Image (spheres, rainbow, N blue to C red):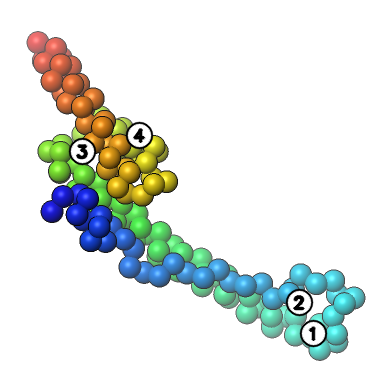
Amino acid sequence: MSIYDNINAGKYKVQIPYPDRAVKPKQLSANVAHLTDGEIKALPKLRAEYEAACQKFGEELDKWREEDNRLRGVFYEDLLAEHGIPKDDELASLLLGKAWEDGHSGGYSDVASVFHDLVSIYEFVQKNYTKKKSK
């Protein structure tokens, strides 16, 4: 399968749902003068629940980001393999960075397209620079 087929098949899409941010109860931001006695008494419990929800959100977001980073690594490896470039190549790593910088706002397809355009630079350097360096 080509890189574009893999993108369309969802190979690099995170399957973990993106977590919902904790919603801060309005009482925690309200002026105390505007709260009832019951609302004031409930503040410690509300604060604890909100802090626990924020902690849970942070943990779930970390898991989501970890999976996103792992899949991005798989995407990079597949993209390099499609062009026959070793994954530990320093120039290829720089070109991947440039492709990501220029294309990621449009998604993986745009990153792949930009990288495809940059492969000619890689090939030129490999063809011309490595020959001169080895002489």
Image position of 101 (left or right of 81): right
The answer for how far apart the CA atoms under marks 4 and 3 are is 16 Å
- Place of residue 2 in the rendered image (x, y in percent of width and height, measured from the top left): 16, 50
- The residue under label 4 is 98
Looking at numbered disc 2 in the image, what kind of residue is underneath it? Answer: Gln
Looking at numbered disc 3 in the image, what kind of residue is underneath it? Answer: Asp
Say what secondary structure mark 3 lies in.
loop
Q: Earlier in the sequence, mark 3 or mark 2?
A: 2
Say what secondary structure mark 2 lies in.
helix
- The residue under label 1 is 39
- The residue under label 3 is 88
Q: Nearer the viewer, mark 4 or mark 3?
A: 4
The residue lying at 42 percent from left, 46 percent from top is: 105
The residue lying at 32 percent from left, 49 percent from top is: 108
Q: Nearer the viewer, mark 2 or mark 4?
A: 4
Looking at numbered disc 4 in the image, what kind of residue is underneath it? Answer: Lys
Looking at numbered disc 1 in the image, what kind of residue is underneath it? Answer: Glu
The answer for how far apart the CA atoms under marks 1 and 3 are is 59 Å
Q: Earlier in the sequence, mark 1 or mark 2?
A: 2
- Pointers 1 and 2 in contact (C-beta within 8 Å): yes
In this rendered view, identify the residue nearer to me: 92 or 40: 92
- Place of residue 58 in the rendered image (x, y in percent of width and height, measured from the top left): 51, 66
The answer for how far apart the CA atoms under marks 2 and 4 are is 47 Å
Identify the residue at the far bottom of this view: 38
- Pointers 3 and 2 in contact (C-beta within 8 Å): no
- Place of residue 72 in the rendered image (x, y in percent of width and height, measured from the top left): 31, 52
The residue lying at 37 percent from left, 41 percent from top is: 103
Total labels: the figure holds: 4
Say what secondary structure mark 1 lies in.
helix
Image position of 37 (left or right of 60): right
Q: Earlier in the sequence, mark 1 or mark 3?
A: 1
